[in-house]
Image (spheres, coloured by chain):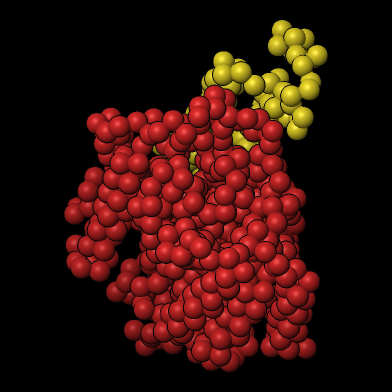
Amino acid sequence: MSDKNARSYWQANVRIVLRLLCVWFFISFGCGILFADFLDQFRIGGFKLGFWMAQQGSIYGFVILIYVYIRQMDKLDHQYKLDQTQSADSSDTDSEEKS
Amino acid sequence: MSVQIWTYLFVFLSFSLYIGIAVWSRAGSTHDFYVAGGGVKPLVNGMATAADWMSAASFISMAGLISFLGRDGTYYLMGWTGGYVLLALLLAPYLRKFGKFTVPAFIGERYYSQSARLTAVFCAIVVSFVYVCGQMQGAGIVFSRFLEVDITTGVIIGMAIVFFYAVLGGMKGITYTQVAQYCVLIFAYMVPAVFISLMMTGNPIPQLGFGSELTPEYGGGYLLDRLDGVSEQLGFGTYTEGQKSTQDVFFITAALMFGTAGLPHVIIRFFTVPSVRDARRSAGYALIFIAILYTTAPAIAAFSKVNLMNTVNNAEYVSMPSWFSTWERTSLIVFDDKNGDGRIQYVGDPQVNELTVNRDIMVLANPEIARLPNWVVALVAAGALAAALSTAAGLLLVISTSISHDLMKRCLAPHITEKQELRYARIAIFVAVLIAGYFGINPPGFVAEVVAFAFGLAAASFFPAIVLGIFYSRMNRQGAVAGMVTGFAFTAAYIIFFKFISPQLSNASHWWFGISPEGIGTLGTILNLIVALSVCRFTTAPPEEVQTIVRNIRLPGEHIEAAKPTL
C-alpha cells in the first residue's frame, strides 16, 4: 500500500472513530447523566426515561456502537483491500472499488 | 437436599471442570503461556474477556451497591461497560496489530525506552495486585458463608485451584477455564433473576420486569414507583433520582471508563486472537456477554430492595426467616433494637435505623430472601466463585508476564532461554498467588475501597500513554514518561490523602471541584495528557523507526509492509 493510501485510510479510520465517540458521549454522559433529570419527565412503561437511559439504554447503545464500528471498519478495510491476506496480488478490482 | 449439600455438589463439579480443562490445555512455549498461542477464536475470546472482566465485585457487590445508591449507581453500570467502546475503538485493534505479549512491552517499544517500560511494569503490578486481593477476599467470603469452612481454608482452596491452572496452562489454560467460568457465572446470575422477576412481576425477562407492574400479591402498581414511594417514606431519598452532584457522577463514570480501557488484564486478552478483525469482533462479543449481566444487575438491585423492605420493615425480630439469622452470624446483617420494641425499624435516619445490611449480601442472600429453591441458592455460590477465580487468574498472569517477560527477559537477564523464561513466569505466578492469598486471609481493611481506585490509577497512567502512542506519532519518550508519572502520582496522592491521611476531610466541600477520590482518575487522565503533550513539544521527535512502528500498527492485515521503510 502506498504512503498516500495509508494516510487516507488512516484519516477515514479516525473519522469513523470520532463520529462514534460523539454518539458514545451523547448516550452515556449526555442522556445518562447531564440530561437525565430532564428526560425523567418522559416515561416508557414503568421507567422514567432518564433513569432507563442511565441503567439500561446506554448499555444497549454501547453494544450497537461497537457493531456499527465493526461494520464500518470492515467496509473500509475492503475498500482499501486490507481484508485480504494476499493484498499484493489483487490489484485488478482496485479501480472499481474506489469509484 | 440442603443448601449446603447442593453447594458442595456445584462447587465440586465446577472445580473439577476447571481442573480438567487445565490438564487438557497445558502450555508448552512462552507463546502459549503469554497469548495462548495467538489462535483464540473471537467468540471464545469474547467469553473469556467477559469472565476475566466480571470479578467478584461485579458478581457479588454491584447489584447491592446499586440497590443502595439508586440512580447514582449508574456510574458503575455505564463506567464498566462504556469503557469497552473506548477499548474497541481506540486500543484493541491497534495493540493486536502491534502483536506483542504485554502492555509494558508496547509502552517500552513505542517509547523506545527502558524507563518507560519499567514505569509501565510498576503501574501494571500495582494495579493488578490491588485488584487481585479483592478477588481472593471475595472467594473467602463465599466459601465461609456457603460451605461453612473458615475464611482461611476457603482462600487456600481458591488459591490452590487458580495456581493449578494458571501455572500449568498460562494464558492457554486461563482462556479455556474462563470460558467455562463465564457459562457458570452467567447461568448462576440469570436463574435467580428470572425466577424473582417472574414471581414479582410475571415477566420472565428481568430487564423488562423491573419496569413492569407488580403482581397483586406484591400490591400491584409499577415496581419502580413503589420503590420510590417506600424509599421516600423511610427517608432514603427517591430511588430513581440522583443524590450525588452531577459533576461527581460525571467524573466517576469517566474514571471507570478510562480505567476499564486501561486495565492490562483486559487488554492482553486481545493479544490472543489471530488478527485485527478478530480483535474488533471479540470486543463486540465481550461487550454483549458483559451487557447480559450488567443490564440484569439494576433489575436485581430493584427487586431485592423491594423484597428486603417488604420483609424487614417494622417486622417482629423473632419472626424473621432463617436466612436472617444465618447472615447475622457472619455479621453482614446487624440488628440493634434501639427502642426495644422487638421490631425492626429500617429507615434512612441513622439515629432511628436499627438494621445494617452489608451491600455484598444483596446478591448472595437474594434467592433466600425471595424463598427460591435450595439449588438456586447453591448455584449463586458456584457463580460467585467462578467470577472471583476467573478474574484472579487473569490478573496473576499480568503480574507474572510483567516480571518474567518485561523485567527479566527485557531488562535484567536478556540472555535467558525460552525455557528459563517460562520457569520465571511460573515462579512469579506462584509467588503472586501466595501474596494475594495472604491478603485475602488478612485483608488490610482497605482492600475493598482500593479496588475502585485501581481504575483511577489505570486511567491516569496507561490509558493516555497508549492512546497517544497510537494516535499521535510525534509523541515521544519524554512526554509519555512524564505524563504517566504525573498522572499516577497525582491520582495516588489525592486518593491516599482523602482515604488514609485525612479521611475526616473527605467530603464535597474539601474535594477539588467537588470530585470524590473515586472520580479523581479522570482529572489524573487529563493532567497526564496535558503534561505529555507539553513536554513532547519541547523535546525531540521520536526516531524514524518508531514512527514506522506507528504507521504500521494503524494498518490491519498481516502482509502489509511498513509504509515507508527507511534504513
Residue in the foreground of this view, choosing between B404 and A71: B404
Question: In the rendering, what colour is chain A?
Answer: yellow
- The answer, for residue B133, to whether it is visible in the render is yes
Question: In the rendering, what colour is chain B?
Answer: red
- The answer, for residue B158, to whether it is visible in the render is no
Image quadrant in which you'd find residue B363: bottom right
- Residue B33 is left or right of residue B120, and the answer is right
Q: Residue at x 51, y 89 (%)?
A: B152
Residue furthest out toward the top: A99
Residue in the foreground of this view, choosing between B135 and B314: B135
- Residue B168 is left or right of residue B55, and the answer is right
Q: Residue at x 36, y 55 (%)?
A: B119
In the rendered image, the vertical position of residue B375 relative to residue A30, given as above or below: below
- Residue B350 is left or right of residue B155, and the answer is left
In the rendered image, the vertical position of residue B279 relative to residue A65, given as above or below: below
Residue A26, percent across and down? 49, 32
Q: Residue at x 28, y 45 (%)?
A: B482
Residue B112, percent across and down? 41, 44
Figure quadrant of the N terminus of chain B: bottom right
Residue B423, percent across and down? 58, 73
Q: Residue at x 56, y 32 (%)?
A: B552
Residue in the foreground of this view, choosing between B530 and B228: B530
In the rendered image, the vertical position of residue B437 relative to residue B273, given as above or below: below
Residue in the foreground of this view, choosing between B240 and B413: B413
